[in-house]
Amino acid sequence: MNLNEYRVLDSGNKQKLEQVGPYRIIRPALNAFWQPSLPQKEWACADATYIRDSSGSGKWSYRNRLPEQWTVDYAGFKLLLKPTGFGHLGFFAEQYRNWDYFRNIKNVLGLREVNALNLFGYSGLGTMAMAQGGCSACHLDAAKGMVDWGREIRKLNEKTVPDNIRWIVDDVIKFTNREVRRNSKYNLIALDPPSFGRGSSGQVWKIEEDLPKLLSICNQIIDHDKPFSVVLSCHSPGFSSIVLENLLSEAFGKGEFVSTEMTVPTQSGRLLPCGISTTFIRK
Ligand SMILES: C[S@@+](CC[C@H](N)C(=O)[O-])C[C@H]1O[C@@H](n2cnc3c(N)ncnc32)[C@H](O)[C@@H]1O
């Protein structure tokens, strides 16, 4: 597996220095409270810096302008990256271990057929890993632009990602409630909820209020007659591994948990924490 075209070169002063294919980029890393380990000249030659302002939005500042889009090989995918106005590039590098889990899900669950659902699916890499694992995969995101981006990346990877993906633009609560009424059943559900979001018709998503509600709806569409798994990852302050485990057991009952602090490939050896991922499994 080639993780080499993306890595964090250094972190510190609440920022991270990333090598993204041929481009060197500085972006916020709000929990990097330490000092950088590389000399200042390594940071000073970055091509672009994303600066966040106090309102929570931000802008790119360029030493060398980045292209509108470029491709990078990372963790088994060819990624199509675009610097967005909110500082994203179109992938969350710390999800790569979950992608491997999805690729192996049939073995993990001991099932010949797996129906998988990826909520808050973003640019679709988790969904594509589910498809690579032989699942019938359903991708859901409220933003049509993200779903279109996911389809574009799927096309770019058509030799390695089967076309068994349902791409859906909808609000997560609305869609899952509809799946309950249709009596749809899934063996694997993945969720990577933001702290705050908007559904496809402007519905407000607030993680503190809505995540317990969403997990309880998910419990109604999980196939309890067979082994199943739920992968919940989170970047929101206060959502520790114990919080995630308590929420999952409240919704799904007894099962086994594996929680990990997510991180990304680094050059310095000093890990950069990038949220928590908890895998729930009932066999
Ligand atoms: C990938 S998650 C965020 C990842 C990461 N956890 C973070 O905090 O930035 C964000 C995705 O959720 C989607 N989203 C936000 N609110 C939503 C909602 N109510 N229904 C469906 N998707 C939603 C957004 O469009 C976006 O692609």
Image (tube, grey):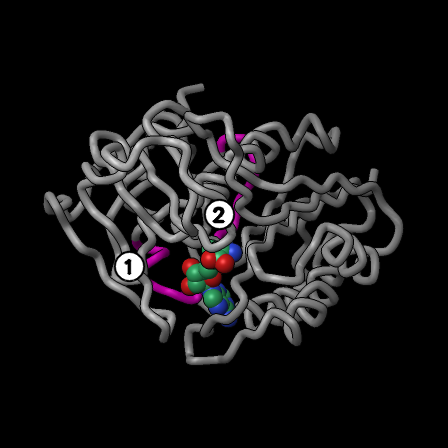
Q: In front: 214, or 107?
A: 214
- For residue 141, say whether it is visible: no
List x then y, in percent, for residue 243: 75, 58
Q: Is residue 33 magenta?
A: no
Cα separation between marks 2 and 1: 15 Å
Mark 2: C-beta under 8 Å from nearest atom of ligand 1: no
The residue lying at 59 percent from left, 54 percent from top is: 234
Q: Is residue 143 magenta?
A: yes
Quarter location, residue 101:
top right
Q: Which mark is residue 51?
A: 1
Is mark 2 in CB contact (under 8 Å) with mark 1?
no
Q: Is residue 111 left or right of residue 234?
A: right
Q: Which mark is residue 282?
A: none
Q: Earlier in the sequence, mark 2 or mark 1?
A: 2
Instruction: Locate the N terminus and report the quarter of the image it occupies.
Output: top left
Q: Is residue 195 left or right of residue 169?
A: right
Element type where label 1 sits in the image: strand
Q: In front: 52, or 227?
A: 52
List x then y, in percent, for residue 45: 19, 37
Element type where label 2 sits in the image: loop
Q: What residue is shown with label 2? A: 32
The residue lying at 55 percent from left, 43 percent from top is: 273
- What residue range appears in magenta? 132-148
List x then y, in percent, for residue 183: 69, 62
The residue lying at 53 percent from left, 46 percent from top is: 274
Q: Is residue 130 left or right of residue 188?
A: left
Q: In front: 3, or 58?
A: 58
